[in-house]
Image (cartoon, helix red, strand yellow):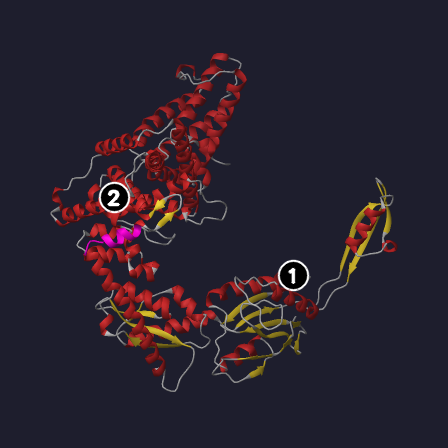
Amino acid sequence: MPDLLIELFSEEIPARMQGMAREALKKLVTDGLVEAGLTYASAGAFSTPRRLVLAVEGLTAESRPVREERKGPNTSAPPAAIEGFLRSTGLVLEQLERRADKKGEVFFAVIEKPGRKAPEIVAEVLDAAIRAFPWPKSMRWGNGTLRWVRPLQSILCLLTTEAGHEVVPLTVEGIHSGDTTEGHRFMGIGRFTVTGLDDYAAKLRRAKVMLDPAEREAAIWSGAQNLAFAAGMEVVPDPALLTEIAGLVEWPVPLMGRIAEGFLHLPPEVLQTSMKEHQKFFSVRNPKTARIEGFVTVANIETPDAGETILKGNQKVLAARLSDARFFWENDLRVAKAGMAEWLDGLASVTFHNRLGSQVERIERISARASEISGMLGTNATLAEAAAILAKVDLQSAMVGEFPELQGTMGAYYLQAAGFDRSVAYAARDHWSPKGPDDAVPSDEISVVVALAEKIDLLAGFWRIDEKPTGSKDPFALRRAALGIIRIILENGLRIPLLLMVTNAIESFFIAENRKHLPKLDARISDMKETLELYRRLLRADLGGVTVMAPGEMETRIQRARAIAGMLSLEQLMEANTKKTDLLAFFHDRLKVFLKDQGIRHDVIDACLSMPGNDDLTLLVKRATALAETLKTEDGANLIQGFKRANNILTQAEAKDGVEYSFGPDPKFAEGPEEAALFKALDAAEAKIGPAMAAEDFPAAMAAMAALRAPIDAFFEAVQINTDNPVIRRNRLNLLHRIRAVCSGVADLTRLEG
């Protein structure tokens, strides 16, 4: 069986596109080969900045012949129907067969396709793949019509067997396939001929090209670590940057340089971000001082001076970049220490969303939400309100303008430099978190409050204007915000009424719309500045006198705010109620996705969602976890079957008789030891389940419920429910109701599958 080697050689392919391109080439070609009747043993795709490569091993030499019979219209059908059938088969009327059918005589087409040789199929498939390649961005060059990410220069396409290799003949827009390629742009040896994958990879290496991107990544990381270790330092890990750099070089040569002393006082995040974004440098940290003191750059060429000239040029450019960063830092510190009024003024003119107001208006809402949430959690409302007002001021800083990914991080530095409490600074840093599934959640109590306030305002606002996620589209990252709230609550073990938090946030938008005499925006900014100065004086003083707002006071403040704003109309109240119910359901859907990844089935979550308190996510997950663990046991799984049997019999009897069998069963009507034992088992279970549920000890409650498995099984084996004695039948149906009631007190077991 021959092996196939394909190389598409071009100008430099952007690093961010190479991974996608490797997978696309592999899929397009292998799928096309299989559809055409060829099979293969394995396939692997590779890339360098100037080439995409596919190696297919164990390809069949030709496709099998195909014989297909296709039934057509009746022989007496209209001519148009017969002509259409002929067009679909590619045959003429004389080639059709006439066969008897239960509906009369019909036409049959017998289509025979002979097997085709692999070179013919490969050429056809590769041509189609090149022309239909799904580049995110592509270009045309010269007078041709072919679109490629960068000008395509050559095509290598070989089939290799033990007898030798052959070029698969192929021409795409004037580019003819061949068996030659070239190596490194500067250190290569010109074009050379290859005979197969092993020969290709070996000759590329001699021409200073590492074909496998994984090998390049390993060489870069190993070289960088060795250089840093020799200097008594360590490289800051950055997997994404490592992958990107491996896509920029064909022959990686790591070089290490030092950062000038005049820049070492900059925050490490600034140094790291500037070097990564502008120059693709790894940061090198001094483990003794925890400062970023050096960098590793990766050259694409070996030089006679061991990279000294390259390093000098890089350090010169780095100095210019870091000079800009130092200017931003020093100017931002001046504004921060002066009170940040300049930044608040700037935020007033920044639109958050054309239907949700400016950033200042959003900050006002977040501050109000932070006050409410502080009351729910019993945290310091004064700190929370201050942190909420200040959390986004760094959006107007020069540093964040240059490096948006540093938003929050720089706010923390500026707030600490301005003398604010660390909790306020941490809230600015962490209120954006978590930004992804692997990102850590805030843990400081003020950061938690502000992060929840920011995200609930985001969700409530877009729910208010009906800009909810649809399908795969989520332009405002609302799914991420909901998952962030879920993770913050669960990972911090918070007991917070999510429905109340959602209600307050959504109703606040309706209340704001009812205000008839809002002060002008500049007056509200002035009030905010005065409040900020009050916080500044308070937070610089002894915090021992700052009291935490009691829950009752929180409710009072909410009611007072609503009274000042004006009551909601009935229509607004109904609309707000619909939106809060829908938003809570959205949270529950995201929770299902989150817990599914942790091995908890969706039907288990549904069974727990049907219970009271389903907006207490911590309680809900405790219940679902306990139920999931119980179902893994033999007693738990069998109990569910017994419960469903009892529920089905009871439901059918109630429907047939038109009554509800919910009157307490009397043990004096029990017949036989199994029925009497079930009464006692239910008494014992209720005695344990009640206190366990009150204490939220769900594992104990589930264990007590699972202990009913044996007596319920024995009861069904020994007892006939629908006996001829109406008194006994009614008592047993009431007993089934008691089984349902006892088990349903833990979760709605009717929602469990299986």
Q: Secondary structure at mark 1?
A: helix
Answer left or right for 215 relative to 518: right
Secondary structure character of the magenta stretch overall: helix
In the picture, residue 545 is in which quadrant? Answer: top left
The residue pinned by badge 1 equals: 34
Which residue is most to the bottom? 304
**Which label was assigned to residue 626?**
none
Tell me which label, 1 or 2, sits earlier in the chain.
1
> 156 or 319, which is in the foreground?
319
Answer left or right for 4 relative to 266: right
Residue 340 among those drawn in magenta: yes
**What's the residue at 49%, 36% (across, down)?**
753
Range covered by the magenta-colored residues: 338-347
Where residue 310 appears, x then y in whole percent? 36, 80
> 92 or 712, which is in the foreground?
92
The amino acid sitting under disc 1 is Val
The residue pinned by badge 2 equals: 523
Where residue 355 appears, x then y in whole percent? 40, 43
**What's the residue at 53%, 22% (across, down)?**
652
Answer left or right for 436 relative to 382: right
Compared to residue 162, the image places residue 437 above or below, namely: above
Residue 359 among those drawn in magenta: no
Where residue 232 appears, x then y in whole percent? 26, 74
The amino acid sitting under disc 2 is Ala
Which of label 1 and label 2 is nearer to you?
2
> In this rendering, does residue 485 appear at all?
no
